[in-house]
Amino acid sequence: MNRTTLSLIAGATALAAVTGFAAVSAPDPGAAERRTGAATLPVERTGLLCPRPSTSDLAETTYTSFTPVTEGADDKGTAVLRSAAQQSAPDEDAEGGDEKDGEKAGKDENDEKGEKGDKDATEGDQADKPVLQLAEPGKPVTAEADGADAPALVGTADGRFASGWTAQQTTEVAAGTGRGLQGVACSAADTQFWFPGASTDDSRTDYIHLTNPDDSAAVVDVELYGKDGELKTTVGEGITVKPRSAEPVLLSTLTAEKQTDVTVHVVVRSGRVGAAVQALDDETGGDWLPASADPSGRLVLPGIPKDATAVRLVAFTPGDADVDLKVRLAAPSGLITPAGNETLHLKGGMTAAFDLGELTRGEAGSLVLTAPDGSVPVVAAVRVLRGEEGKQESAFIPAARPVETRATALDNTAKGTTLSVTAPEGGAEIRVTASAGTKGGTPQTKTYSIKSGTTQDIEAPVPAGLKGSYALTVETRSGGPVYASRTLASTEGGVPYFTVQALPDDRGMVAVPDASEDLSVLQR
């Protein structure tokens, strides 16, 4: 095998390890002359999974799909999301740039006669059609679904739509357990997930949603850890998730122990799944709890709302070693230590919770947690409350991955959107682009400087002549690392509805070794 072939295999293997499943094509002949080391190329195939939005008949869900314009991407491709129960391959001739496909993708937004995308999501006789299909990069599309029949979605993107493909579902529940605004970014399949901040208490109804995108069944173990260690579970081992289907599992049915704060560990024995916890409360609404960043000795939880009335930190260390976490708040003026919470003690293998009160005190803020020498890995999340007692709403912010190159938040509106950015270790410059709107509008771009150790709620750009919702894409230009989150907020009946999504890197680009690089060591 010659060295050129080895180089391309090495790049593709690294890509697959990053994205779960992905592909990259060989660079064009001119690319080799333009690079001096590794070439950075757009991902050419990727997948996303969206959990079932709600079990409430009062739920109103909006699905959104978007791919940013990426230089060097292919000029053809598709990005299709389908019901998990009815997933099928896209039509061979369904290229995303085709005018007919564009009409299909945006039909729910533009048809004044009410033929909305929720029909694709709920009517059995149309289940073979896409729920969402992109028409062009740079313009988001949406579909709507009402009630408890809104499906989990499974999707793939290739060609020009793969690099940076992002999808989101936002659900408003008018009343009942979990009432409020619930949002979650659709995620890639994986084999392990950590969820600190779940609960088996009687006041909570928490589900772990497992979505299998593949043609074979997945087998999953769900482990629960409480304040005294691992909880005894009755049916948490060997859960089968059927091919191309979604399985919601009520956590309180897995154990007889009722605990306010629980860490959920999902381990996939065979296959792969997408996973997210839906945490619903009788009094304070509910939201999605995405997986924490991988266990680490340094964690950042970005974008705690400045008007938060209560912040509860839940943390867990998977090993046997205890650790004293150093706690700092990255505020607009810099890193500060919260009074009375300078360090937090975690016992190995036990979930610990800490009430931090009105932590942000009217200013933007992000939590920075550090273990001594970074030697003990930790996972963490915060539960945030807004509003006064009796009219409160809750949301979750897990420890996040940094925006290494680019990340996108969807379903933004001209009012009620807050973009929060923190650079805990060094100053950074970022560029933020507001896409075209789903119903019209011209993209706008602004550049911002984020000072070292600070969090800033930036005044993000809005598309000129905006109609509908739009995407916000954050790109790091220099410095870093940068962490970001986006808050959507509205007020209904005096209750401050809100949801927060961290913005992890979209992993839309991959470094491929230069074809001339000596990789003969791989032949050993």
Image: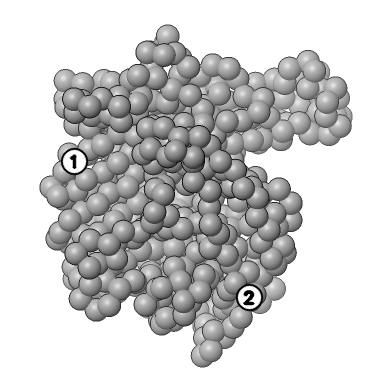
Q: Quadrant of residue 473?
A: top right
Q: Locate the N terminus and report the quarter of the image it occupies.
A: top right
Q: Is residue 28 above or below residue 344?
A: above
Q: What's the coloring here? A: one colour
Residue that lies at the very extreme toward the top in this rendered image: 93
Residue that lies at the very extreme toward the bottom in this rendered image: 340
Q: Quadrant of residue 222?
A: bottom left
Q: Which residue is mark 2?
A: 333
- Tell me which numbered mark, 1 or 2, is placed earlier along the sequence: 1
Q: Nearer the viewer, residue 520 or 396?
A: 396
Percent across and percent down for residue 476 are 66, 49
Percent across and percent down for residue 295 are 55, 61
Q: Residue sitting at 86 percent across and 32 percent down?
A: 36
Q: Nearer the viewer, residue 269 or 243?
A: 243
Q: Is residue 283 visible?
A: yes
Query: Mark 1 Cα within 10 Å, few/some/many (few <14, many 20+)?
Result: many
Indicate the amino acid at tag 1: Asp
Percent across and percent down for residue 341 are 52, 86
Indicate the amino acid at tag 2: Ser
